[in-house]
Amino acid sequence: MHSDTTTVALVTGASSGIGREFARQLAKKGHNILAISNQQEELILTAAELATLNPSGKFPTYFADLSQPGADMQLLEYCHANGYEVDILINNAGIFSFRTITDTPPERIDLFIDLHIRAVTHLCRTFALDMKQRHCHGYILNMSSMSCWMPMPGIAMYSATKAYIRVMSRSLNVELADDGITVMAACPGGIATDLFKLPHQLQRIGVKVGALATPQRFVSGALKRLFKRRRQYVNGLLNRIAIVAVSLLPDRLRLIVKHRLLDKQITV
């Protein structure tokens, strides 16, 4: 590495939740972090926290809406202009909502596609190509979801776009194998964050009974597998069992879940 360059881990959606936890744990491991988010105030707070965890590190921030066309190239140009060489890419930014497709506004459907499919694909391509050109045996982690195996009514856009992320990541990992670049799909079950709009009290209960994992535990496991160059990570034995069990549910039971649980959720 030249004296005027800095290797960094690029984390999208770094201002809160799992993304912020990825940034924390990577900073603790001694990595410099380029934190990306469309939440500017929270992003500044994240960078300040990272500086306390690793006083010798560098923690630049980049405010951006990754769903916009060309965001990947603008981000790469920013990195080149500032001497940042990305050797770890964490594609974490995402959205969630409990809505049937017909009840989902068209612009929300576009956002799922733009953020989970187009942005993730272009970020992978852009930064993997940059890694190849630098002969960097880097790492890419793409956040999928356990729901990618178990489509459920009310979260069709979420589970479908997360399924794309998993399949694309598995394919890309093979394509980049000769270049020494690892692409891992992380497929968590429920995580105690604000993404699902659960009250904090219910999150704590979910963690206590084992229905939810803490961001700390999930991220620790994900990074451990990533640096061992694994291709996929599903946290927890119960989640791996649930993938099989839920896939066998008949449509009649899926409708019961929709009527009794999902129909009570109102988010856009």
Image (cartoon, grey):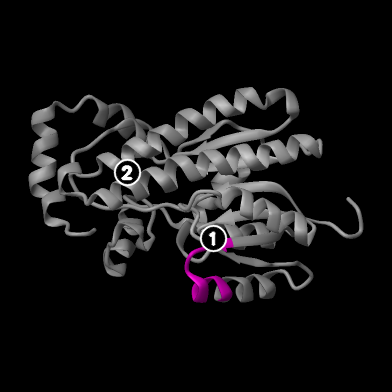
- Badge 1 density bin: few <14, some 14–19, many ≥20, Cα 10 Å: many
**Residue 188 appears in the figure:** no
Instruction: Residue 196 in the image: state x and y as whole percent.
Output: 31, 57
Callout 1 amino acid: Glu
Q: Which residue is mark 2?
A: 158
Q: Nearer the viewer, residue 245 or 263?
A: 263
Q: Nearer the viewer, residue 120 or 207?
A: 120
Q: Secondary structure at mark 2?
A: helix
Residue in view at x 42 percent, y 52 percent: 94
Q: Nearer the viewer, residue 9 or 108?
A: 108
Q: Secondary structure at mark 1?
A: helix
Q: Which residue is mark 1?
A: 21
Residue in view at x 53 percent, y 51 percent: 219
- Check the image and name the residue furthest to the right: 3
- Which quarter of the picture shows residue 161? top left
Relative placement, left or right, of 155 versus 204 is left
Residue in view at x 54 percent, y 60 percent: 21
Determine whether label 2 and label 1 are within 8 Å by CB: no
With respect to residue 140, does 78 lie above or below? below
**Residue 242 appears in the figure:** yes
**Considering only order in the chain, which callout, 1 or 2, is on the residue closer to the N terminus?**
1
- Magenta segment range? 36-44
Instruction: Residue 198 in the image: state x and y as whole percent.
Output: 27, 62
Q: Nearer the viewer, residue 123 or 99?
A: 123
Relative placement, left or right, of 26 versus 208 is right
Q: How many marks?
A: 2
Callout 2 amino acid: Tyr
Relative placement, left or right, of 227 versus 161 is right
